[in-house]
Structures are given as structure tokens and as C-alpha cells.
Image: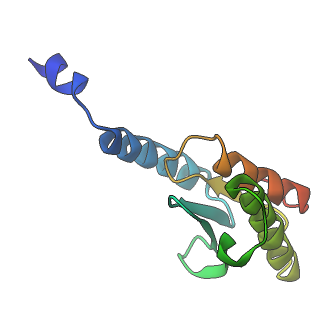
């Protein structure tokens, strides 16, 4: 009976399970900063968070010019990299917040790397 219940998990339950697992791994390494990414149907938002939980920088791709959502996510990653460099942050952990490393999330991470941030 227990196996039958696991077979009927929803997408939300799988997302939450991944989110908990990823957060535990990231927090166990105790990074100085972490880039926390959120994704909606239209936009990608990200915040740079200290271990104490303070937000140092944030970005949203809402006002950026790009033909596709993936291009806007890449531009947002590059813009966040510039904000982080102004505050002398060159290394951070990438917290994908349970989302699969695919599409806009991967494009955002690539934009951060192109901007010179080590994740």
C-alpha cells in the first residue's frame, strides 16, 4: 500500500522534495553567498543571500530586452554578475530552488559564468 501512495505523487511534491534535498546540500557546505533563483511562467528572479539570510543583490528579467525567455534569463545572469562584482563577490553557490537545471535556469547560470562569477 505504501508503494501505491508513492506512485501517485504530484509534480509539486517532487519539486518540494528536490528543493529540500538541494537546500540541505548547499547549506551543508556553508558558502559565503548563494544565488537563489525563482522562476515563474514569464520571468526569472534571483537574489544573492548571505549565510545570515540578508539579501545583498537581486535581479528580475522583466525589463530586459530579449527575443526569448531564455535570452532574457542569460542577460539577467550577466546583469546580476555585474551587481555582484560591484560588491566584490566573485564566488557563490547556485541554489536552483528545486527546478531542473534546464532551459532558463541553465541559461541564467551560464549568464552568471559569462559575467565572471564562479558558481
Q: Is residue 7 left or right of residue 18?
A: left
Q: Count numbered badges in the picture.
A: 0
Residue placed most toward the observer, 106 or 23: 106
Quick check: 47 above or below 24? Answer: below
The single residue placed furthest to the front in the displayed view is 67
Residue 74 in picture, x, y percent from top left: 78, 58
Going 56% across and 63% down the picture, which residue do you hit? 42
Residue placed most toward the observer, 117 or 99: 99
Q: Is residue 29 left or right of residue 68?
A: left
Quick check: 36 above or below 86? Answer: above
Q: Is residue 69 left or right of residue 115?
A: left
Residue 76 in picture, x, y percent from top left: 75, 67
Residue placed most toward the observer, 63 or 32: 63
Residue 39 in picture, x, y percent from top left: 54, 59
Residue 6 seen anywhere in this rendered image of the structure: yes
- In the rendered image, the quadrant that contains the N terminus is top left
Colour style of the rendered protein structure: rainbow
Going 89% across and 63% down the picture, which residue do you hit? 115
- The quadrant holding residue 67 is bottom right
Residue 89 seen anywhere in this rendered image of the structure: no
Going 69% across and 66% down the picture, which residue do you hit? 32
The single residue placed furthest to the left in the displayed view is 1
Q: Is residue 83 left or right of residue 115?
A: left
Residue 64 in picture, x, y percent from top left: 75, 73
Going 51% across and 53% down the picture, which residue do you hit? 97
Amino acid at each position: 500500500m505504501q508503494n501505491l501512495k508513492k506512485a501517485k505523487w504530484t509534480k509539486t511534491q517532487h519539486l518540494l522534495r528536490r528543493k529540500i534535498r538541494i537546500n540541505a546540500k548547499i547549506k551543508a557546505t556553508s558558502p559565503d553567498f548563494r544565488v537563489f533563483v525563482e522562476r515563474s511562467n514569464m520571468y526569472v528572479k534571483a537574489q544573492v543571500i548571505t549565510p545570515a539570510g540578508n539579501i545583498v543583490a537581486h535581479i528580475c528579467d522583466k525589463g530586459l530586452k530579449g527575443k526569448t525567455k531564455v535570452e532574457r534569463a542569460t542577460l539577467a545572469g550577466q546583469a546580476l554578475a555585474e551587481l555582484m562584482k560591484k560588491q566584490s563577490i566573485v564566488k557563490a553557490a547556485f541554489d536552483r530552488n528545486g527546478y531542473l537545471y534546464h532551459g532558463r535556469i541553465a541559461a541564467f547560470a551560464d549568464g552568471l559564468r559569462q559575467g565572471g562569477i564562479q558558481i
